[in-house]
Image (cartoon, coloured by chain):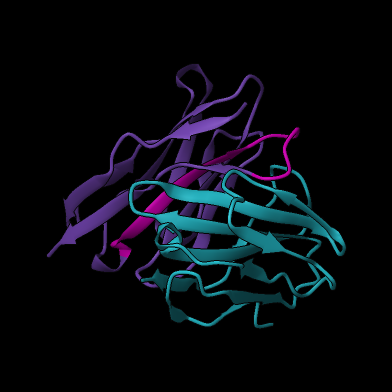
Chain colours: A cyan, B purple
Amino acid sequence: NAGVTQTPKFQVLKTGQSMTLQCAQDMNHEYMSWYRQDPGMGLRLIHYSVGAGITDQGEVPNGYNVSRSTTEDFPLRLLSAAPSQTSVYFCASSTGLGGGETQYFGPGTRLLVL
Amino acid sequence: AQSVTQPDIHITVSEGASLELRCNYSYGATPYLFWYVQSPGQGLQLLLKYFSGDTLVQGIKGFEAEFKRSQSSFNLRKPSVHWSDAAEYFCAVGSGGSYIPTFGRGTSLIVHP
């Protein structure tokens, strides 16, 4: 199993540009999520999905959209990038929906917005 | 609501020395507790987790953690640190009422030769 994969690894955007961060998992996990990691802030939840067709907002959802058309994929869309969205983005998946489930993380996408 | 605090932003230890990373949580009932490690440029990997039962939990890479309900703590320990342990360590707390755990801000471990 490849686990959780993310593309691209690095991306530079100009303010106002749009892009999609890709996330895929091959473990048949129902639950997937997106986090951003900023210095001194730890991990903050952006959006999550409890199954195909079902998504919900996390702690910092503004400026981001998600959809979940399949169990495997959970892309994160930036509609109009802003410098405040410069961060490292992690996708994660887990087998279950409870607070006790282990999260499996992808390697991350480093995004710089100029 | 659940929350977790990692009081130390950075910890510096010498190779071979013992290590303890602190984690305090806030939750009314018995929580689920986790420690994750993030090596430079990598995603997070689970070190160990506590659900119930024995309060001393063994994890991978020689790490252990002890759940102390009276102190609302779940500190991570290792008796002898290796240079490869240099990384960012995250404590997380979950509960039966939430879909997802809450992560702390992380502690950066620096290992001197």
Using the image as rendered, state which of residue A12 and residue B94 is in the foreground.
A12
For the C terminus of chain A, the image quarter is bottom left
Q: Residue A81 location in percent, x, y?
A: 50, 67
Residue B96 sits inside the magenta stretch: yes
Rendered image quadrant of residue A113: bottom left
Using the image as rendered, state which of residue B49 and residue A88 is in the foreground.
A88
Residue name at image x 62 percent, y 26 percent: B1
Asked if residue B80 shows in the view, the reply is: no
For the N terminus of chain A, the image quarter is bottom right
Using the image as rendered, state which of residue A65 and residue B46 is in the foreground.
A65
Vertical placement of A81 versus A58: above or below?
Answer: below
Q: Residue A103 location in percent, x, y?
A: 63, 57
Q: Residue furthest front?
A: A16
Residue A22 sits inside the magenta stretch: no
Q: Residue B71 location in percent, x, y?
A: 45, 20
Q: Residue A73 location in percent, x, y?
A: 75, 74
Vertical placement of A95 versus B3: above or below?
Answer: below
With B2 as the anchor, is B98 left or right in this view? right
Q: Write down the region rendered in magenta.
A: B85-100
Number of numbered discs visible in the structure rendering: 0
Asked if residue B112 shows in the view, the reply is: yes
Rendered image quadrant of residue B81: bottom left
Using the image as rendered, state which of residue A69 and residue A5 is in the foreground.
A69
Rendered image quadrant of residue A88: bottom left
Residue name at image x 44 percent, y 71 percent: A111
Q: Residue furthest left?
A: B113
Residue name at image x 28 percent, y 43 percent: B9
Vertical placement of B20 versus B112: above or below?
Answer: above
Vertical placement of A80 versus A3: above or below?
Answer: above
